[in-house]
């Protein structure tokens, strides 16, 4: 997905997506099938609802560090979310213009984990004695894109990865995948009639052989019934660990969101409906199950 503008934010988002698309084969599979089906004529017609990142809540890292990049580019910090069982915090960020995707950043509450797991995480991150975002020029597109993919810590050993995996699959995902884009999200309600509900679009995904995350049901529905979300099962990657070991791990995935029209605008002509007339934000219950797109219960089913 290429952002059409010439500004630095357009370039950052396009660069992020280019790396993500290379790592997640479902992206091209789905977009190509959408063209073949006549749902879209060009990939750029797809509206990106939001992108998401995972971080570790330790000194000089986590949300307080990572968010600086998007705040610099005009994003506005919005609602806080807490995921008790997964030991996560998160915020979402509204874009400077509706043409850009929302951003969702989550963070592992490392201090809530067992001492043995904390020790492993800090073994890799304790050498980071300054906020790494403060060490780059966030005005430089090249430096920002390099930051998203570079190693802030050493490649973990397979033993350490598996130790983290046993207690927190989120922790093991981040310790290996770092700041790679976790997922992007297709706005289903923006598609043509016949494919613009999540139920209809999921039937299309099933037809083309895409495996969907069924944690909490294939379609995750907010309490108000206005935000519906589904996601693919994460890509399986053969990861190379320090010491020469290799192991299959989960990479990134694709999400799908249907934001329904708010009750106060239900009588508005569909041609006049804009993003401001639809359900905004996120839902803890939905996101909790979307996280599991990278979990072993999904990728091994």
Image (cartoon, grey):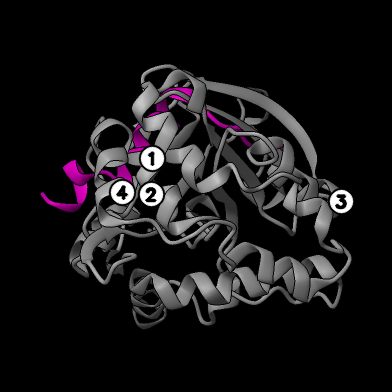
Residue 231 horizontal side relative to residue 179, left or right: left
- Please tell me which of labels 3 and 1 falls first in the chain: 3
Q: Nearer the viewer, mark 3 or mark 4?
A: 4
What residue is disc 4 on? 161
What residue is disc 3 on? 72
What residue is disc 2 on? 173
Does residue 122 sit above or below 96 in this rendering? above
- Please tell me which of labels 3 and 2 falls first in the chain: 3
Q: Is residue 280 visible?
A: no
For the point 65% across and 41% down, the residue is 61
For the point 83% across and 51% down, the residue is 134
Task: Identify the element where label 3 is drawn.
Answer: helix
- Part of the protein shown in magenta: 276-301
Residue 92 horizontal side relative to residue 187, left or right: right
Q: How far is disc 1 from disc 4 in space, using C-alphas? A: 11 Å
Task: Identify the element where label 4 is drawn.
Answer: helix
Q: Is residue 113 visible?
A: yes
Does residue 116 sit above or below 175 in this rendering? above
Task: Identify the element where label 1 is drawn.
Answer: helix
Q: Are marks 3 and 4 in contact (CB under 8 Å)?
A: no
Tell me if mark 1 has few (under 14), some (14-19) or many (20+) residues whose alpha carbon lies within 10 angstroms of its own. Answer: many
What residue is disc 1 on? 170
């Amino acid at each position: 997905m290429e952002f059409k503008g010439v500004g630095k934010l357009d370039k950052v988002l396009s660069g992020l997506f280019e790396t993500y698309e290379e790592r997640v084969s479902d992206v091209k599979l789905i977009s190509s099938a959408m063209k073949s089906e006549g749902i879209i004529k060009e990939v750029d017609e797809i509206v990106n609802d939001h992108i998401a990142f995972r971080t570790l809540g330790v000194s000089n890292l986590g949300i307080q560090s990572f968010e600086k990049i998007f705040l610099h580019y005009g994003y506005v910090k919005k609602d806080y979310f807490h995921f008790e069982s997964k030991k996560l915090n998160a915020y979402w960020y509204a874009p400077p213009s509706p043409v850009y995707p929302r951003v969702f950043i989550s963070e592992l509450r490392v201090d809530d984990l067992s001492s043995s797991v904390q020790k492993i995480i800090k073994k890799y991150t304790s050498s980071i004695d300054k906020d790494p975002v403060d060490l780059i020029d966030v005005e430089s597109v090249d430096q920002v894109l390099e930051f998203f993919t570079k190693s802030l810590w050493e490649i973990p050993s397979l033993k350490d990865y598996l130790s983290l995996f046993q207690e927190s699959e989120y922790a093991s995902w981040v310790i290996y995948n770092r700041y790679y884009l976790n997922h992007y999200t297709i706005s289903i309600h923006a598609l043509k009639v016949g494919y613009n509900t999540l139920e209809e679009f999921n039937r299309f995904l099933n037809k083309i052989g895409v495996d969907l995350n069924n944690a909490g049901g294939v379609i995750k529905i907010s309490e108000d019934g206005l935000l519906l979300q589904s996601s693919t099962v994460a890509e399986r990657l053969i990861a190379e660990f320090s010491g020469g070991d290799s192991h299959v791990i989960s990479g990134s995935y694709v999400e799908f969101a249907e934001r329904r029209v708010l009750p106060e605008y239900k009588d508005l002509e569909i041609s006049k409906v804009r993003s401001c007339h639809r359900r905004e934000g996120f839902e803890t219950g939905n996101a909790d199950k979307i996280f599991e797109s990278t979990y072993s219960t999904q990728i091994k089913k």
